[in-house]
Image: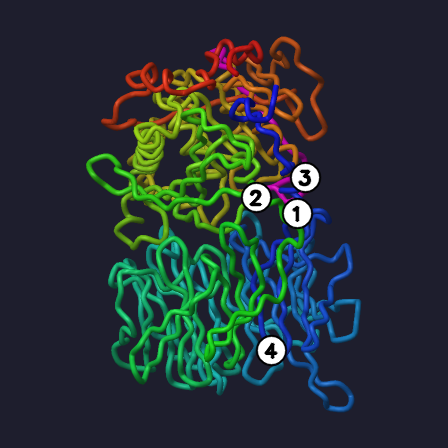
């Protein structure tokens, strides 16, 4: 079989799962201090996150020797886990050290300049976690969010941790400044140290629903005279930043979009540049800032919709001047008042650590996430499309067509709908080698920003209010059917996959008749169970997504994939980490059991030591290869990975499909197992209505095998 005659899915590709897993460094939360730039750098091949520093002469230093690893589990999703701090040596020369949270014990440590052995700053109590650190005005302490887990309860506060190290032995030296609310973020002392600004919110709201910007006088005994400067139950405020001792900037979605505001210590906040755009990313992770204030008084802000790019706001002229770069997706700004650093990317450029000159607009790439990239001829160029949804609502999507330099033009291709997690997250145009892994083999991807996604204003996010499992499913189905109607997607070879909340959407979508199979990566399957077992941060999230309990218990049952397994007639792949504290492993097991009891083909693959999202290189490789093998099994093509066996019995019986191989390391079941379901698929024509006509135009690519055929093994049909 020649390359040009290869069937979609079997195109020869130079991009391996190993390339995806180990080929990209994960850079996050850059900081700038004079000529030095600092950042967190994830090392999948080492299974840890280190801290890096780039000196004025361009020298890059790895600061944390293995097994040290920076990371915080506050809110389970974590956030900024370190802070460069000025330290004076015995000659009174200021040199920068760094405070960081160690991932293994969650204590704060101080690493002095020139040292390789961090020293602890907080007690070894096994109960406390720390995140989002800020330096006190006098430079003697860091202020941060503390989260304590004791006797099944979670308590959060803002604390002051002395850099002297006294708190490691004397817990009382870690001074509590603010407490009483369920959640805190962004502790930000004023330049003169007289005041502290911070953000707080309470259950059942999430930070993108409603939060408050609070300010109080900062003294030895804590905070006094606190008051709310902006925000409330239906207004989300993000990233307070002091311009001077009496002026704050903050992002607020009061007008329906996260816009920038200026606020004095009293009086009404003033909108700087009202626009129907987002001037801040979703506040899902602590310490992620999308704007910064320069010494000149100008503001560098990221703004846009799903993808944010930089502009410079001049408060004197009220002008917002875009900074022209070839990078489409920016995040995580920081400044020392003069220069700006960020992480930026594009569809063909992996994330880069960049330095932005706000005067000239020049961008200097300081470090790339990957030094070696595949030939760009194998990288898809996405199309941003606004597709018609149910009742005329827009559905925003990024379409990644099959891409290969020798690709045959032989009609509609198989497509996989990607449903992002969150579910109020967003899919951007950022470089993603995982997508290229599939598109370079002939499988298209459509990444859907369904109703509820961030980037399109509060009203778009509110579309998911009480409608999770309905609106998200309708929008994903609408996107798939729109591509079928365009003639680019084969209606018989449509799949849907998603991580976490996206896995839930994928499973719910499988109860309809649009998709031939689905993949749930650590997805929610039982809403009632999730509400009882998930972590505190999201323990009341379902109040807004589904309804409050116990009043809506029947709705929880009706919208749980595990209760609708009887409606799923297609194969499902379930992938789960056994250390997941967000979506616990019993969710995947329950779904597999429900599918097995009705004899539906599925695969359940579990990974020891992995949590919510896989960090280990081996798990990432196996997960990706298993997914490709699953599509090969269902769509009937030969893949360059080991074949996957499906089972049709509950996992507790140990029964497997014919020819199953022994379970590989990290997998409880041999191969993979599938399950899924969906809500209303909308008013668009069904796949069956258009399958025959479009299949005639599909060239050499025929339809996939039936679920029964898929369970039995690959077919010989096709090219």
Residue numbers of the magenta segment:
597-618
Mark 4 touching mark 1, by CB under 8 A? Answer: no
Quadrant of residue 170 within the rendered picture: bottom right
Which image quadrant is residue 651 in? top right
- Mark 1 and mark 3 in contact (Cβ < 8 Å)? yes
Do labels 1 and 2 touch, CB within 8 Å? yes
Query: Would you call the spot at circle 2 few (<14 residues within 10 Å), some (14-19), or many (20 or more)?
Result: many
Residue that label 3 marks: 18
Q: Is residue 626 left or right of residue 363?
A: right
Tally the marks: 4
What numbered label is drawn on residue 433? 2
Marks 3 and 4, Cα distance to the nearest angstrom?
36 Å
Disc 3, SS: helix
- Residue at disc 2, secondary structure: helix
Q: Residue at x 33, y 44 (%)?
A: 385
* Disc on the earlier residue, 2 or 3: 3
Marks 4/1: CA distance?
29 Å
Mark earlier in primary sequence (3, 1): 3
Residue topped by disc 1? 23
């Amino acid at each position: 079989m020649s390359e040009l005659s290869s069937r979609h899915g079997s195109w020869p590709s130079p991009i391996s799962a190993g390339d995806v897993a180990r080929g990209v460094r994960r850079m996050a939360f850059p900081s700038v201090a004079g000529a030095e730039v600092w950042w967190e750098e994830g090392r999948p091949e080492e299974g840890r996150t280190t801290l890096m520093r780039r000196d004025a002469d361009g020298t890059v230093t790895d600061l944390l020797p293995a097994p040290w690893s920076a990371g915080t589990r506050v809110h389970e999703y974590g956030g900024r886990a370190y802070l460069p701090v000025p330290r004076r040596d015995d000659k009174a020369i200021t040199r920068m050290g760094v405070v960081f949270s160690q991932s293994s014990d969650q204590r704060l440590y101080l690493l002095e300049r020139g040292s390789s052995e961090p020293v602890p700053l907080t007690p070894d109590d096994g109960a406390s976690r720390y995140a989002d650190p800020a330096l006190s005005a006098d430079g003697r302490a860091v202020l941060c969010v503390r989260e304590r887990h004791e006797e099944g309860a979670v308590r959060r506060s803002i604390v002051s941790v002395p850099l002297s190290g006294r708190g490691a032995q004397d817990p009382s030296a870690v001074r509590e400044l603010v407490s009483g609310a369920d959640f805190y973020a962004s502790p930000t002392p004023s330049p003169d140290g007289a005041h502290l600004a911070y953000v707080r919110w309470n259950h059942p709201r999430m930070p993108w629903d409603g939060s408050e910007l609070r300010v109080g006088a900062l003294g030895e005994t804590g905070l006094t005279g606190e008051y709310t400067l902006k925000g409330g139950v239906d207004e989300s405020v993000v990233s307070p930043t002091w311009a001077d001792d009496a002026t704050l900037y903050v992002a607020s979605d009061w007008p329906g979009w996260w816009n920038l505001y200026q606020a004095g210590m009293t009086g009404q906040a003033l909108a700087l540049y009202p626009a129907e755009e987002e001037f801040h990313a979703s506040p899902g992770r602590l310490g992620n800032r999308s704007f910064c204030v320069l010494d000149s008084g100008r503001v560098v802000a990221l703004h846009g919709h799903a993808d944010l790019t930089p502009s410079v706001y001049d408060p004197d002229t009220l002008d917002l001047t875009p900074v022209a770069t070839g990078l489409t997706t920016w995040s995580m700004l920081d400044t020392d008042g003069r220069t700006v650093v960020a992480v930026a990317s594009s569809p063909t450029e992996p994330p880069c650590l960049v330095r932005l000159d706000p005067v000239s607009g020049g961008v200097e790439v300081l470090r790339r996430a990957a030094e070696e990239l595949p030939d760009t001829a194998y990288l898809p160029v996405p199309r941003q499309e606004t597709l018609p949804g149910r009742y005329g609502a827009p559905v925003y999507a990024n379409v990644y067509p099959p891409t290969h330099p020798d690709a045959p033009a032989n009609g509609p291709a198989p497509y996989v709908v990607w449903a992002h997690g969150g579910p109020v997250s967003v899919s951007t145009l950022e470089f993603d080698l995982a997508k290229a892994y599939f598109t370079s083999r002939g499988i298209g991807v459509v990444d859907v920003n369904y109703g509820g996604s961030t980037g399109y204003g509060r009203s778009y996010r509110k579309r998911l209010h009480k409608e999770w499992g309905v609106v998200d499913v309708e929008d994903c189905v609408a996107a798939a059917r729109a591509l079928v109607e365009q003639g680019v997607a084969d209606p018989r070879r449509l799949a849907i996959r998603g991580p976490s909340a996206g896995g839930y959407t994928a499973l719910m979508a499988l109860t309809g008749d649009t998709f031939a199979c689905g993949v749930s990566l650590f997805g929610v399957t039982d809403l009632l169970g999730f509400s009882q077992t998930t972590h505190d941060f999201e323990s009341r999230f379902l109040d807004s997504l589904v309804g409050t309990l116990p009043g809506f218990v029947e709705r929880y049952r009706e919208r749980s994939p595990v209760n609708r397994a009887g409606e799923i007639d297609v194969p499902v792949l379930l992938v789960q980490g056994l250390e997941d504290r967000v979506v616990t492993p019993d969710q995947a097991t329950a779904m597999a059991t429900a599918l097995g009891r009705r004899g539906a083909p599925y695969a359940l693959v579990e990974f020891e030591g992995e949590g919510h999202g896989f960090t280990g290189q081996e798990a990432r490789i196996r997960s990706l290869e298993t997914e490709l093998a699953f599509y090969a099994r269902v769509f009937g093509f030969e893949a360059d990975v080991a074949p996957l066996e499906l089972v049709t019995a509950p996992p507790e019986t140990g029964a497997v499909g014919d020819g199953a191989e022994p379970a590989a390391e990290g997998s409880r079941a041999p191969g993979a197992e599938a399950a899924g379901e969906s809500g209303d698929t909308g008013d668009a024509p069904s796949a069956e209505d258009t399958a025959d006509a479009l299949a005639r135009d599909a060239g050499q690519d025929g339809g996939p095998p039936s679920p029964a055929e898929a369970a039995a093994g690959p077919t010989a049909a096709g090219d």
